[in-house]
Amino acid sequence: MKTSINFKAAKSDSEVHNFRKKSFDYIRKDLTPKNEYWMEQKIADRLQKIEAYCKEKSGRKLQKNAMPVREAVVVIKEDTTMLELHNLSKRLEEELKIRVFQIAVHKDEGHYDKDTNEWKPNYHAHLVADWQDLETGKTLKHQSFHYSKMQDITAECLEMERGNSNTGIQRLEAVEFKIRKKEEELKILEEKYNEMKSEIESKKSEELIVKESDFLGFQKIKIEKTVENYEKALKVQNTKLVKNKIDLESKSKQITELNTKIEDLKQEVDFLKSKSSVVLTNEKAFAFEKKKYLDSVQNTLEKAIRFEKLNPSLKIESHQQMIAELIKISEKVSHKNNIPSSAFEEIFKDSVKLAHLFTILRFGDRKSNQSTNNDIENSPKKRQLRR
């Protein structure tokens, strides 16, 4: 499945649309609960911050035609997670200085196929980004090869699969099964189509002939009535034939789409097998992939904590509340992103990382003093969380 990313100036109503602050007639409300959202800052607040920094850094106001806040629509898969999108955001910042501060995953948009009336989902994510160059205070200047690189980064991040390669294989088997079912349906339709086509030429056509006896007792065909019967029969059969022809074309179209999907999945499985082979046979590669994965989990967990901090009702007044809230957020991140609990256990074993998470949860992005860190490090609650 192909993906793409294309940044444009953020619209004034972006947050209304992205975070579903009102209802829209082009979405399926029953699917809206499947959407996911993350926000570090509101657009208005970030824009104010950008303007102030530009004046401080360059001594000039931000140009009126500048586009310091931009938004991209990214094509995703049904199973794309917020973790993968955070990884994408991190790569965009590291390699292109683009800082994403809002993400909205939409799984409630799409359309119904006009032929089959089948729901065709449009899975995508909105990434809202800060386009300011921190070195100059002005907007980032990218060249054509940067935009090409942006596409490469997006494709790489969103095609990455977590866990073992069986996931891809299972999906492949599911699609193959669906193709077989569609082919069986097509075969049945073709048989029915041919049967109906030949029916009018069969012996049943004799039933349409109307005869009457003359005064000598000879049977004669009543031409007008017989023609009328044939016309009615032809009309009914033609209607059925047209309907079945449409059904056949629809089924053929679905099979073509499924075959394309299965080819994409086969390539994905081959890639996963190749990657798994390298990771399992190369100790350095395994260590690298493990660190890379745990770093991405930590990054996603930190962003989730910052998002929860935006909730004014969240109050942390004790170590016990802090631990309970961290566990709650971790479980939510685990469920949404299919992250095993062992990954969080690995992170919590690192006292520095754990102290950093506690600090964000209690103080936001402000740095805590050394005594706070020591207090957390020596707290018996920390040992409880590790267990």
Image (spheres, rainbow, N blue to C red):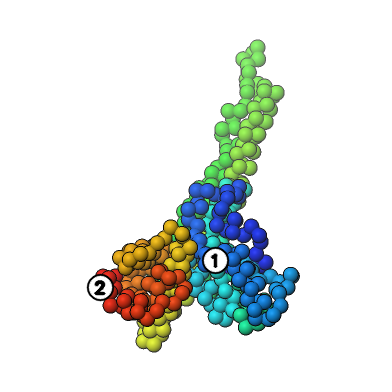
Locate the C terminus and report the quarter of the image it occupies: bottom left
Residue 189 image point, x, y percent: 53, 47
Residue 28 image point, x, y percent: 54, 49
Identity of the residue drawn at 35% across and 64% down:
317
Residue identified by numbered label 2: 380
Identity of the residue drawn at 32% across and 75% down:
376
The three-letter amino acid code for the residue at tag 2 is: Pro
Sort mark 1 into few (<14), some (14-19) or many (20+) by Cα contacts within 10 Å.
some
Q: CA distance from mark 2 to mark 1?
A: 34 Å
Residue 45 image point, x, y percent: 59, 66
Tag 2 secondary structure: helix
If you read the primary sequence from the N terminus, does the residue marked by circle 2 or circle 1 appear first?
1
Residue 180 image point, x, y percent: 47, 57
Q: Is residue 197 left or right of residue 326?
A: right
Q: Give me the disc on residue 26.
A: none
Sort mark 2 into few (<14), some (14-19) or many (20+) by Cα contacts within 10 Å.
few
Q: Is residue 233 left or right of residue 344?
A: right
The three-letter amino acid code for the residue at tag 1 is: Gln
Vertical position of residue 175 compared to residue 84: above or below: above
Closer to the camera in the image, 113 or 183: 113
Vertical position of residue 255 compared to residue 380: above or below: above
Locate the N terminus and report the quarter of the image it occupies: bottom right
Q: Give me the disc on residue 41.
A: 1
Vertical position of residue 99 compared to residue 75: above or below: below
Tag 1 secondary structure: loop
Vertical position of residue 202 compared to residue 265: above or below: above
Q: Is residue 144 visible?
A: no
In the picture, residue 143 is in which quadrant? bottom right
Identity of the residue drawn at 46% across and 60% down:
311
Q: Is residue 360 visible?
A: yes
Identity of the residue drawn at 27% across and 70% down:
381
